[in-house]
Image (spheres, helix red, strand yellow):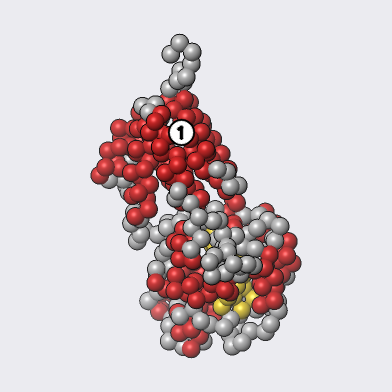
């Protein structure tokens, strides 16, 4: 990415994508800061000279007025769009600009490491699903129609672009494909397969790998405890426990439910890897490792497709506002039948 700046070959629309615990957003801001830095460091005088002369890759200086503003997220040519919804404070026509103060604090206080659920909790919409709406799409067009204030490039970062509402997408197709001169779009995503195809086709995709500096997060630890209890109840066909489980998890909010199901799907995959490939993921340890070792023999090869279909269907219906209590009870009973195909049969 650095070389594209030095060679003046910056693609006007780029998609930074990767897993939740990668540094996509931090890299997007750092990349934009480097582009607009007025005193870039470590640039060889001859393009043919390798970067070893400077002891590493070129970087932004961190002290010029542009860099200082970028580090505080207050640069007038740096713009953000992110999923929002109505709140007690913003009761109608929510837009990213109305949450800008909370957004800056959210990123800086969390060192860019918190995800979508953390953002929803910050602005108080954890029981709703945020979207990038038509109002923000209009704002993108309006904002980028102005000349830059002080930098070479105007930068528009769209975080979690997969949350772009499908009916709003056509509004930005033209400007995304043919933006004003010296305009840079950086789209950030965790699930590029959910991005509207007409948006995806207009970007240069940049895969950001998992950050090895991040450990297991607290939410995953909570998911593990819940998943273990849930699977034990399903395998034991403990119907009363499952009836109690459904309304309890329904209280957590749709985004947390979705993240729990994604965690569950990944854990089933880990069980399959351990059971049939003999692979023990490095991140597993302690109680989680013990549970997966004990649980994996019960994940039969013929059931993997069934588990995958059940969890993905549940995620799909949660995104479309299915009643969570009913959904999780139905899902639980279907999992019971995967473990015990004769469950509920007459005479059993």
Mark 1, residues whose alpha carbon is within 10 Å: few (<14), some, or many (≥20)?
many
Most distant residue in the top direction: 347
The location of residue 140, given as percent across then percent down, is 66, 72
Report the quarter where the C terminus lies.
top left
Residue 43 position (above or below residue 313):
below
Quarter residue 237 falls in: top left
The location of residue 198, given as percent across then percent down, is 70, 57
Q: Is residue 93 visible?
A: yes
Q: Residue at x 68, y 64 (%)?
A: 134
Quarter residue 267 falls in: top left
- Horizontally, residue 284 falls left or right of residue 67, namely left
Q: Nearer the viewer, residue 157 or 105?
A: 105
Q: Residue at x 42, y 58 (%)?
A: 21
Q: How many marks?
A: 1
Quarter residue 293 falls in: top left
- Horizontally, residue 162 falls left or right of residue 145, namely left
* Helix, strand or loop under label 1: helix
The location of residue 314, given as percent across then percent down, is 53, 40
Residue 204 position (above or below residue 44):
above
Q: Residue at x 43, y 68 (%)?
A: 112
Q: Residue at x 35, y 59 (%)?
A: 214
The location of residue 256, given as percent across then percent down, is 46, 51
- Horizontally, residue 197 falls left or right of residue 188, namely right
Q: Which residue is mark 1?
A: 332
Q: Is residue 278 visible?
A: no
């Amino acid at each position: 990415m650095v070389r594209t700046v030095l060679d003046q070959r910056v693609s006007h629309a780029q998609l930074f994508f990767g897993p939740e615990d990668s540094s996509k957003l931090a890299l997007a801001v750092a990349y934009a800061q480097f582009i607009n830095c007025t005193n870039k460091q470590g640039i060889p005088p001859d393009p043919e000279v390798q970067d070893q002369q400077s002891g590493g890759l070129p970087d932004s200086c961190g002290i010029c007025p542009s860099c200082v503003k970028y580090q505080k997220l207050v640069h007038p040519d740096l713009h953000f769009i992110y999923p929002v919804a109505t709140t007690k404070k913003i009761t109608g026509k929510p837009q990213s600009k109305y949450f800008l103060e909370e957004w800056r604090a959210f990123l800086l206080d969390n060192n860019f490491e918190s995800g979508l659920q953390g953002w929803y909790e910050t602005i108080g919409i954890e029981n709703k699903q945020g979207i990038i709406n038509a109002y923000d799409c209009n704002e993108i067009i309006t904002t980028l129609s102005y000349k830059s204030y002080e930098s070479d490039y105007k930068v528009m970062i769209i975080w979690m672009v997969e949350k772009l509402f499908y009916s709003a997408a056509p509004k930005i197709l033209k400007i995304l494909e043919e933006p004003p001169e010296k305009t840079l779009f950086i789209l950030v995503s965790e699930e590029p397969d959910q991005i509207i195809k007409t948006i995806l086709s207009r970007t240069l995709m940049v895969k950001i790998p998992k950050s090895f500096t991040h450990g297991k997060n607290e939410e995953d630890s909570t998911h593990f405890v819940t998943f273990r209890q849930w699977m034990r109840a399903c395998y034991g066909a403990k119907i009363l426990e499952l009836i109690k489980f459904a309304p309890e998890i329904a209280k957590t909010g749709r985004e947390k439910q979705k993240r729990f199901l994604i965690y569950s799907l990944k854990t089933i995959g880990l069980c399959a890897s351990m059971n049939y490939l003999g692979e023990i993921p490095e991140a597993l340890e302690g109680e989680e490792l013990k549970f997966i070792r004990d649980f994996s023999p019960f994940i039969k090869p013929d059931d993997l497709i069934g588990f995958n279909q059940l969890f993905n269907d549940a995620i799909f219906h949660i995104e479309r506002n299915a009643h969570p209590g009913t959904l999780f009870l139905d899902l639980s009973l279907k999992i019971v039948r995967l473990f015990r195909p004769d469950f509920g049969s007459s005479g059993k």
